[in-house]
């Protein structure tokens, strides 16, 4: 992804340089950077977030993309910092989407297969194969992500950071996520249910409004109390909301983070009345 955006940066910089031959390198860089940030923000809020948390939650949070005009929601008292519950649990939902095997198609049409475990700590693959980035981007665009559910590919649950010297064994990202949540002493799943109005569960059965019964039984098999459920586990076992991929608890944690990221950022690309706001001609 980083390579993709560096290439986009260079594409825009070339256009701006043609239009503004008098600009110094620093101005060219800063103006290009601002446009690329706007592109990332626009794609994130207009195409990606609606799929992840659903348009109705976005509406409720007031973070849907405007069809025209400016957003005037900048509030200097908003704290845009990342919540631990977001980084250490909710936003890791992406681990369930990761594919284990990629069908690479290079720019010249050459096909090959990439197995995720072979890529860990192996930057040489990229260095030695000029077709690698294009092949991977094609794979990622042509191939579906895995379903968002309570499972993740074995490449991440058994073979994470595997190298030839570890002889077929790697780490388990699910366990790392659980352990990291405990290291950071983040809120429990039940506490987060209460915060976001999903309803504090008094018994395991109370999870029925969000979680399939067969998963409740499995959860009950490993936790003594409903108050012990790790946020990562509780969030990943919730059923998706009708118009999004995440369940209500993770959806709200993710939605709220993107809400403060927008309202706490006076440079957000469609924020109006700010010194750096885009003019209509640029927007
Ligand atoms: C091949 C794909 C991926 C691999 C190998 C991977 C691996 C990892 C690893 C090893 C960690 C650190 C775990 C720890 O020790 O706590 C991590 C953290 C994290 N991952 Fe992933 N991940 C992948 C894809 C994703 C995706 C698709 C998302 C979200 C859409 C995601 C979101 C996160 C987040 C939010 C963190 C915590 C970052 C932080 O707090 O600094 N990851 N990932």
Image: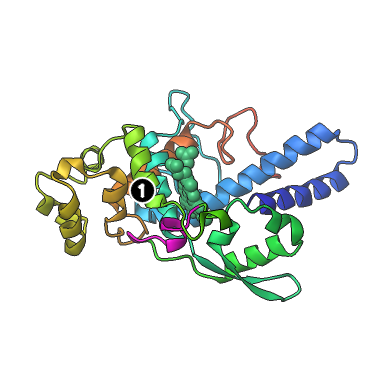
Q: Does residue 156 show up magenta in the picture?
A: yes
Residue drawn at (22%, 45%), measured in percent from left and top? 229
Decide if ligand 1 comes within 8 Å of the CB at mark 1: no
Residue drawn at (53%, 60%), measured in percent from left and top? 117
Which residue range is magenta in the image? 149-160
Quarter of the figure with residue 149: bottom left
The residue beneath circle 1 is 175
The answer to whether 75 is drawn above or below residue 133 in the figure is above
Residue 59 visible at all: no
Q: Nearer the viewer, residue 21 or 151?
A: 151
**Relative image position of residue 207 (x, y in whole percent):** 16, 52
Whether residue 107 sits left or right of residue 112 in the image: it is right
Q: Nearer the viewer, residue 132 or 3?
A: 132
The answer to whether 213 is drawn above or below residue 46 in the figure is below
Categorize mark 1 by other alpha carbons within 10 Å: few (<14), some (14-19), many (20+): few
**Relative image position of residue 266 (x, y in whole percent):** 55, 30
């Amino acid at each position: 992804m980083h390579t993709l955006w560096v290439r986009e940066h260079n594409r825009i910089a070339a256009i701006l340089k043609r239009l503004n031959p008098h600009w110094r390198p620093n101005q060219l860089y800063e103006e290009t950077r601002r446009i690329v940030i706007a592109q990332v923000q626009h794609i994130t809020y207009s195409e990606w977030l609606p799929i992840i948390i659903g348009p109705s939650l976005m509406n409720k949070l007031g973070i849907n993309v405007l069809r025209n005009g400016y957003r005037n929601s900048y509030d200097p008292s908003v704290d845009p910092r990342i919540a631990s519950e977001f980084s250490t649990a909710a936003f890791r939902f992406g681990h369930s989407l990761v594919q284990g095997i990629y069908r690479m198609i290079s720019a010249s049409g050459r096909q090959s297969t990439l197995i995720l475990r072979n890529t860990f700590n192996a930057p040489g693959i990229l260095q030695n194969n000029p077709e690698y980035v294009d092949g991977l981007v094609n794979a990622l665009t042509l191939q579906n992500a895995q379903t968002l559910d309570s499972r993740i590919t074995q490449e991440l649950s058994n073979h994470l950071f595997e190298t030839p010297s570890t002889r077929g064994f790697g780490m388990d990202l699910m366990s790392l996520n659980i352990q990291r949540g405990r290291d950071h002493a983040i809120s429990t799943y039940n506490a987060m249910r209460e915060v976001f109005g999903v309803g504090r569960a008094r018994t395991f059965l109370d999870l029925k409004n969000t979680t399939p019964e067969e998963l409740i039984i499995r959860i009950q098999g490993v936790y003594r109390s409903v108050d012990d459920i790790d946020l990562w586990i509780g969030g990943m076992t919730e059923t998706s909301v009708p118009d999004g991929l995440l369940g209500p608890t993770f959806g709200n944690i993710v939605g709220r983070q993107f809400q403060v990221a927008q309202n706490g950022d006076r440079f957000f690309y469609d924020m109006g009345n700010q010194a750096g706001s885009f003019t209509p001609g640029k927007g």
